[in-house]
Image (tube, rainbow, N blue to C red):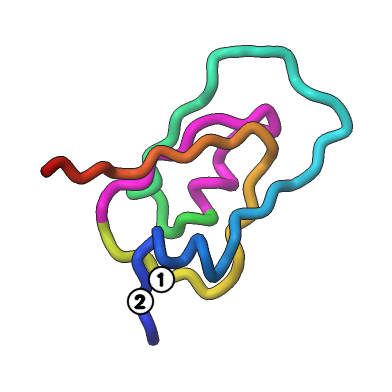
Amino acid sequence: MKFLTFLAVLSVFPLTTKSQDSPTPAVAAKSIVASDFDSLQKAFDALPESGGVVSIPPGTYEISEPLIAVSYTHLTLPTKRI
């Protein structure tokens, strides 16, 4: 099995979104930490249809198929300071 870092995977498996018929009114976005779930997809699936924020901590993730997220999903990725 190959393990790919998340940033490299974005170029191989683009993030796709499920379409919604109409935008949802602005409400407080649900925030999820991906490491609390068994897989990145399960973290995306835990968001409501109105979207939210998925924080992906540093690490190596195995991704074998494209990630699917609802509309209005935002990702926060770790930053590296020099």
Q: Residues within 10 Å of mark 1 (few under 14, many from 20)?
A: some
In the image: residue 53, left or right of residue 18? left
Quadrant of residue 68 within the rendered picture: bottom right
Q: CA distance from mark 2 to mark 1?
A: 5 Å
Q: Quadrant of the N terminus?
A: bottom left
Q: Earlier in the sequence, mark 2 or mark 1?
A: 2
Badge 2: few (under 14), some or many (20 or more) residues near its Cα, within 10 Å? few
Question: Disc count in the image?
Answer: 2
Give coordinates of residue 49: x percent, y percent.
70, 33
Tag 2 residue:
3
Q: Give the residue at mark 1.
A: 62
Q: Give the magenta-colored segment's residue range.
A: 42-58
Residue 43, image x, y percentages: 49, 47
Lateral position of residue 49 relative to residue 42, left or right:
right
Q: Amino acid at mark 2?
A: Phe
Residue furthest toward the right?
Answer: 21
Residue placed furthest toward the bottom: 1
Does residue 51 belong to the magenta stretch?
A: yes
Residue 17's spot in the image, x, y percent?
A: 70, 48
Q: What residue appears at the point 37 percent right and 46 percent down from the top-left corner? A: 56
